Image (tube, grey):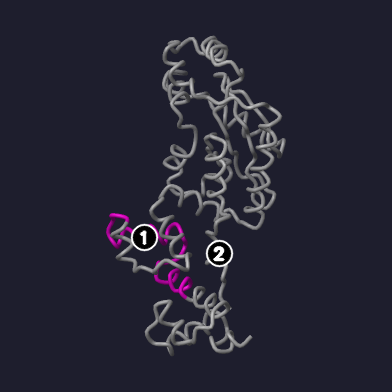
Amino acid sequence: MGNNKVYLRFSKNSFFEIIDTFEYLTGLQICILLHKDYNKDIVNLDNIRGKMTHRNPFCSLIKENKNGGKGCGGYDVNCRSQKAKEKGKPFLDECPSGVVELIIPLLINKQFVGTIFCGQLRKFKDIKKNILYICKLNTFVTKYSIKEKAKNFLWIDDEKLIQIGNLLFAAINHVTSNMDYNEMKKIIMLKEHPLLSQIIRKLNDLNEPILSASENAKKCGVSLEYFSRLFKKIIGKNYIDYSTEVRLERARQLLKNTDLNIVRIAMEVGYDNHSYFTKRFKQYFGCVPKRFKRH
């Protein structure tokens, strides 16, 4: 019988949908730094890291002006990520530039693979006091620049922040408890290609039509060759095989949840020849549609 997890992998409880919901509800911005023992496995890591880590105006200002433009001296990698690995639970941390963030270990099957940063937060509730504090720590940047870049930092009570962190930690652990690293790599790469991610989501939506590879390539504004190559690199199988699995999973859902006959179901999922549909269904699920529906 085929693996029907393919169909469920990008459900509404997926990793990045939890991240997106968290950002929307809290106003905090999340970035992810994968541990050095794992990030070597990710294609185009520098490109991913450049988009996935601190990219807010304040951090960009500090990185451009501190240490000759070399950034924060590896504080996230050498200090925060190490603490996250050791603590194994959410905690608060202030960076050398005076910005507070909620730090959450990223675990896959209880194994530490990276760090999640949630920010940016004020150390002090009073905005003016916080700006003055940051200016004292960053004398190499003008007060005006700091004020403009840091004025929108949020202030949330420490106790409440930890509670928020524990909630996110639990939600992510629920999703990643049965996930392997290759799946996490796939999720991160899909985040970097939102149009492809949208195509995957639509494929797994019973109400959306299943488009051909050429139609999807056109939607993405790329050539069919590029789309096919990118899809296989990220998903691990070619588009035809993946879309076939989706069609058959849709058929299984229709057989299970509707009174439609076999011929109609075959047509609904894109098979004009119901005999061929029956053959593929048996190859994938180990039994013919009629028997599956009966049981």
Q: What residue sits right under mark 1 in the picture?
A: 229
Placement of the C terminus among the 4 image quadrants: bottom right
How far from the left and from the top, in percent, is residue 141? 44, 13
The quarter holding residue 202 reads bottom left
Label 1 environment density (alpha carbons within 10 Å; few <14, some 14–19, many ≥20): some
Q: Amino acid at mark 2?
A: Leu
For mark 1, give the secondary structure: helix
Height in image: 273 above or below 148? Answer: below
Q: Which residue does the image show at 58% across and 22% down from the upper left? A: 122
Height in image: 35 above or below 282? Answer: above
Q: Which residue does the image show at 56% across and 71% down from the upper left? A: 4
226 in magenta: yes
Q: Which residue does the image show at 55% across and 45% down from the upper left? A: 21
Height in image: 245 above or below 60? Answer: below
Q: Which residue does the image show at 48% across and 87% down from the upper left? A: 262
For mark 2, give the secondary structure: helix
N-terminal of the pair, mark 1 or mark 2, is: 2
Q: Magenta: predominant secondary structure element?
A: helix
The quarter holding residue 182 reads bottom right
Tell me how far mark 1 sits from mark 2, CA to CA. 23 Å
* Magenta part of the chain: 220-247
Which label is found at residue 146? none
How far from the left and from the top, in percent, is residue 86? 71, 36
The quarter holding residue 120 reads top right
280 in magenta: no
Q: Amino acid at mark 1?
A: Arg
Which of the two marks, 1 or 2, is nearer to us in this view? 2
Q: Are marks 1 and 2 in contact (CB under 8 Å)?
A: no
Q: What residue sits right under mark 2 in the picture?
A: 8
Q: Nearer the viewer, residue 294 or 42?
A: 294
